[in-house]
Structure formats: structure tokens, C-alpha cells
Amino acid sequence: MTPRLLPALALLVSTAIFSPIAPAQEPFPSRPIRLVVPSSAGGPGDVVSRIIANDLSTRLGQMVIVENRPGAGNAIGQDFVANAAPDGYTLVHIASQGILNYHLINRPFDFRTAFTGIAQLYPQHAMLAVNPKVPSMANITNVAQLIAYAKANPTTLNYTSSGVGSSGHMMLEKIKLMSGAPMQHIPYKGAAPAFQDVIAGRIPVWGGTMYYLPQVKAGQIRAIAVGSAKRQPDLPDVPTLIEQGFPGLVAGSLIGYAGPAGMPRHITVRLESEFKTTINKPDVVEKMAKAGVIVGYADGTTFSNAISDYYDYWGKVIRESGIKAD
């Protein structure tokens, strides 16, 4: 060996001895995953999340534990996840009310960039309905008739939804902006108590989603419009808002799952794949259908973009309507 090669050889040896070895990537998941539902137990988000968590637990070989953290229009649970470690072990169910709530209360971050999208779960179309057993609603079968009644009774017509910023609330506020109809929103802290008061006849008009389709078919409420772009197969005789003179008005709940911003790409990809497989399984589809949910799937990037668009579009409606937090 020539003398001039000795320094180079020494450098290679010392590099091999003293260079740190990169740690092996920890397999994911290696411990239970927490799935936060920022609303009360028994509501649509909770029911759907438990169906999905049960299947994911089997597939991943680790428990996916649903944890309800309701309050402040979904902000308590969402803030908790936004501030969690971005390691894939803390996820959150996101729905429209939680997104739009950030137009109404001061939060320490921008909702549009605070999360890593994982899966856009399903389209939950908005539905406008009345209680036909309430005398004033007995003959209301379309939106034009509801608007006419509201204008003829400008201080008496109330409607309700699952809360401020919910898809049903936004749908009716947009209808009010486009028609000039005077209707008063009576907010509740969840879909279940609001809907019970509609069924009891205390509030005659319901702005919600097709999650309550079984109650329509049972005759407890009468659907007079759907917020989808086209008529829905389960309500073929109920026209869309667009058909009833509200051009471009598509309303519904944006729903999906996310983790904190900054999650590693390999973990996001794994979760996207597992959510997609679970959501498309026939037995999961069947369970969802029994819960009033028609399933669909879009990837995390699509969901993140949809959140941003939804936040901007309906945020404008909030400002134009002068909506305030409870």
C-alpha cells in the first residue's frame, strides 16, 4: 500500500467506527390509537366512528379507542388533537360544524392548516324537513310554500339544527339570504335533542342531514328538499334546492378523519390505506347503511382541500348572515 493512501484509509475506518447508525423506523402502529370524537356519544359522528374503529382495530392489530371530547362546538376535541404529537396515534373525527366553528370563536391556529387529512369519509347531504303534525306545517310540501308561510308570519316561524355552524343551519341561512324569508334559528348542542323537539312538535322545521332518513320513511317528518346536486335514490320524490329555485345551492356535511399537522408521510399513507379498505368492506357498508349513512371515500389530500374550500365558502355565509356563537 502506498503511503499516500494511508490517510484516506484511516478516514474511512474512523467514519465507519464513529458515525452514528440511524435508528430503525418503528413499525406503525405499535400501540393503541386514540380516535377523538369531538361530540357527544350516540350522535352520528360517534356511531360511525365506533363502526370504523372496531374494524380498524382488527386490521391494525392494535386497539383503536374512540374517545368523546364534546364541547365548544367541537373545538375542545379538535384543539386537543391539533396540539397532539403528529405521530399517528391521535386522530380526530372532523365534521362541518367543527370546521365552521372557527369562524365564530377565537382559536390559536388556522383550521385549514392545523390537521393532516387522512380520509374524507362520506357525503352527508343536507335535508330540509317539517313536522307535518304541526298544524302550520300540515300542507307545506316544498320550499316555496315554507318561504311564503315565513313571510306571512315574520315573527313566528322557528327552525332548529344540531347547532350553530352545522350543515343544516348553514343551509337554512343561505336559503334566508337568497329568499329574504324571516326564520329564527333555535340552536341545540347536538342533533339528538334538537331532533326530539322537532318530533315533539315544539319546533316545526328541521335543518339536518339524511342521517334521519329512517324518520322520514316512518312519517315522523316530511322532507321537502335535499341539498345534493341531484335527487337522492332514497328520496326520489324530494326535489333538490337547485330544482326549487336556488341555483348553485349544494349543502351538506363535510366529514372525515385527520391527525395533527406534520404527520410523517409513511404513517399518513398507511392510515389512508387502512381507512379506505375498512370503509369499502361490505359489512362496514351494511352497518353504515343501517345507521343512515351512505359511505364513500376520498384520500387525505382531497379531504384537506375540501376542508379549505368548505371553510371559505360557508365562512362567507356566516359573515353575510351575521351569525354569532351561542
Image (cartoon, rainbow, N blue to C red):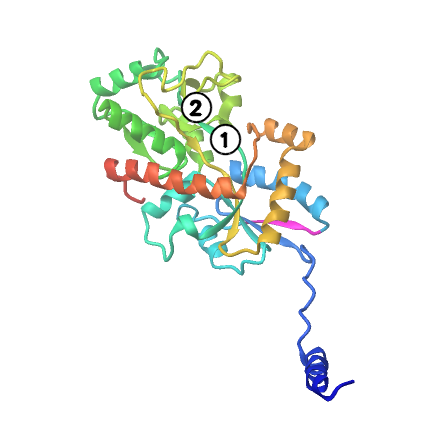
Horizontal and vertical percent for residue 44? 52, 36
Q: Residue at x 72, y 86 (%)?
A: 6
Judge the density around disc 1: few (<14), some (14-19), many (≥20) Cα neighbours within 10 Å: some
Disc 1, SS: loop
Q: Position of residue 65 (x, y in %)?
A: 62, 50
- Is 21 placed above or below 112 here? below
- The mark total stands at 2
Q: Nearer the viewer, residue 18 or 106?
A: 18
Label 2 Cα neighbours within 10 Å, binned few <14 / some 14-19 / many ≥20: many
Can residue 43 be spotted in the picture?
Answer: no
| Relative height, residue 271 to residue 246 (above, below) | below
Q: Indicate which disc residue 228 carries.
A: 2
The mark nearer the N terminus, 2 or 1, is 1
The magenta segment: 62-67
Magenta stretch: helix, strand or loop mostly: strand
Q: Find out whether residue 104 is within the magenta segment.
A: no
* 296 displayed left or right of 314: right
Q: Position of residue 20 (x, y in %)?
A: 66, 76
- Name the side, left or right, on which 246 lies relative to 252: left
Asked whether the beta carbons under mark 2 and mark 1 sit within 8 Å of each other, the answer is: yes
Q: Name the residue rendered at 51%, 28% in the picture.
A: 211
Q: Identity of the amino acid at label 1?
A: Pro
Which residue is located at x 47 percent, y 44 percent?
304
Q: Quadrant of residue 130?
A: top left
